[in-house]
Amino acid sequence: MSNENTTSSRPTSVFVVAALVLIEALATLAYAISYMLNLDTNGTVNLGGQLFMLALCLLLAVWQGSVAINFFKGKAFTRAPIIVWQLFQLILSVSFLSSNIPMVTAVAVLAIVIAGTTVVMLFAPKTTAFLGDRPNR
């Protein structure tokens, strides 16, 4: 079910979720650009593997941006990809908490907070009503 042509205004939770997913998309894009600038033929992975990883990161950034935009439009099908991405983000972030580099640990904590906030706001009653899962009250 879609709520694209709604006459009611979007709840704050929809703005928050869409913004957080868009921030994640921009972070993924920034990582891809950083990765591209550091491509090296002498790396542990051959150049073909590095180019595949770069393409995958770019594809994920575009996909996340698309999901954020479609969620903002009220497309209910976007909830599943958002949840899957948040679970991946939680799993990866927890593994970085034991890092000896303070910046890596800080970014891991930030990613966990963003993922948790996104999941909670995604299932807020006003968000699910906006997506058409519940009748408006």
Image (cartoon, rainbow, N blue to C red):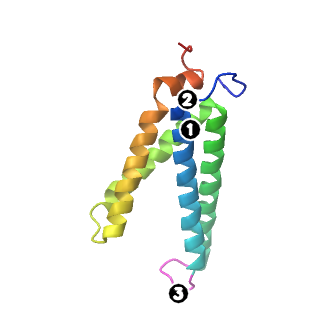
Please tell me how crowded label 3 is: few (under 14), some (14-19), or many (20+) other residues with Cα within 10 Å. few
Count of numbered tags: 3
Q: For the residues marked 1 and 3, what is the alpha-carbon distance in whole angstroms? A: 44 Å
Please tell me how crowded label 1 is: few (under 14), some (14-19), or many (20+) other residues with Cα within 10 Å. some
Q: Which mark is residue 122?
A: none
Callout 3, which amino acid? Asn
Residue at the image point whose x is 59% and y is 78% from the top: 37
> In the rendered structure, which segment of residues is drawn in magenta?
40-46
Residue 74 position in % (x across, y down): 64, 31
Quick one: label 1 or label 3, which is nearer the N terminus?
1
Q: Is residue 74 magenta?
A: no
Q: Is residue 43 above or below residue 3?
A: below
Residue 112 position in % (x across, y down): 37, 50
Q: Is residue 41 magenta?
A: yes
Closer to the camera: disc 3 or disc 2? Answer: 2
Quick one: label 3 or label 2, which is nearer the N terminus?
2
Residue at the image point whose x is 70% and y is 28% from the top: 4
For residue 32, what is the image quadrant? Answer: bottom right
Callout 2, which amino acid? Pro
Q: Which mark is residue 11?
A: 2
Determine which residue is flagged by label 3. Answer: 42
Q: Give the SS element for disc 1.
A: helix
Residue at the image point whose x is 38% and y is 55% from the top: 110
Q: Give the SS element for disc 3.
A: loop
Q: For the residues marked 2 and 1, what is the alpha-carbon distance in whole angstroms? A: 7 Å
